[in-house]
Amino acid sequence: MAAGFMLTVTLCLLILSAAVLFVLIQLVKRCAAAAIDDIMGVEEGECVSKLEQVRLLKELGISIVPEEGEQEFILGLTPSENEYLASHPYYGFCILAGSRNALNCVFSTGDRECIYQWDSYGKILKGLKAVSGLPFEEISGMERYAVTFRLNGRDYSWKARKNGDWMDTGMAGYLNRILDRQNCFGDRRFYLDNSHEAPLYLYASGAMADEVNRKTGLKFRPARTAHSH
């Protein structure tokens, strides 16, 4: 009888030990997954890993340049940047990478308050030139709120609405008007998503802009302006 009792106790202990081991294994798996997600920039809820963001954006035609620098850019992000990207899907990545001139067709100033010095709009135009490949020449921001340039042998100037350090996002709309008039640069135009903490500019066809919006939740619209000369 004692032997039977001991056998029962032993079996119960074995079952209990197995249950405890199973729970510990699950906890370890969860901790490991959380650690991996932290490295990749994932948080709980509706967050999207930066690797998934990079994959989908590339599929849509928005990629890190040069291509061989993609891994270096991703691994070089800080923990706080990873957290920001994960909790602000797609637009956070576009703002961060676009403000570092790391994307092929998206540019961002990284902040709305960026008009601090005389050549601020000249620098913005150079950023738009980089993502579009358009042959803007003689870019000069001789005044704090104005920029001059040449395109196809013609001189142009644009004056921003003055609002302290806050930027006027309308320059890309002025560029679209020029592209429509010259009618020699294909169907791509500048699109603006002005719904976040920093403006995003996309140079693309209308079909591409619509697809980006549909699959990422971004809100690119044709850039427009009333402030041009």
Image (cartoon, rainbow, N blue to C red):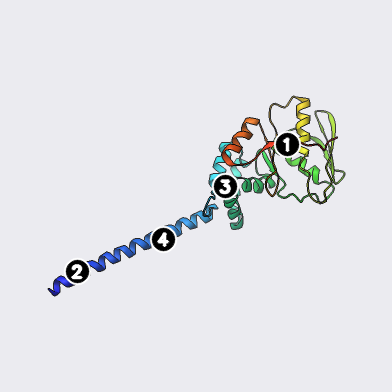
Q: Quadrant of residue 64?
A: top right
Q: Secondary structure at mark 3?
A: helix
Are discs 1 and 2 less than 8 Å apart at CB? no
Q: Secondary structure at mark 4?
A: helix
Which amino acid, mark 4?
Val
Q: Secondary structure at mark 1?
A: loop
Could you tell which of marks 1 and 3 lies nearer the N-terminus? 3
Instruction: Kindly report the distance in space between the C-alpha atoms of the residues bearing marks 3 and 2.
Output: 57 Å
Could you tell which of marks 1 and 2 lies nearer the N-terminus? 2
Which amino acid, mark 3?
Gln
- According to the picture, the residue beneath numbered tag 2 turns out to be 8
The label shown at residue 34 is none
Which amino acid, mark 1?
Ala
Give the mark toward the camera: 4 or 1.
1
> In the rendered image of this protein, does residue 56 appear above or below residue 5?
above
Viewer can see residue 172: yes
Give the mark toward the camera: 4 or 3.
4
- According to the picture, the residue beneath numbered tag 3 turns out to be 71
Give the mark toward the camera: 2 or 4.
2
Percent of width and height locating residue 179: 76, 29
- According to the picture, the residue beneath numbered tag 1 turns out to be 223
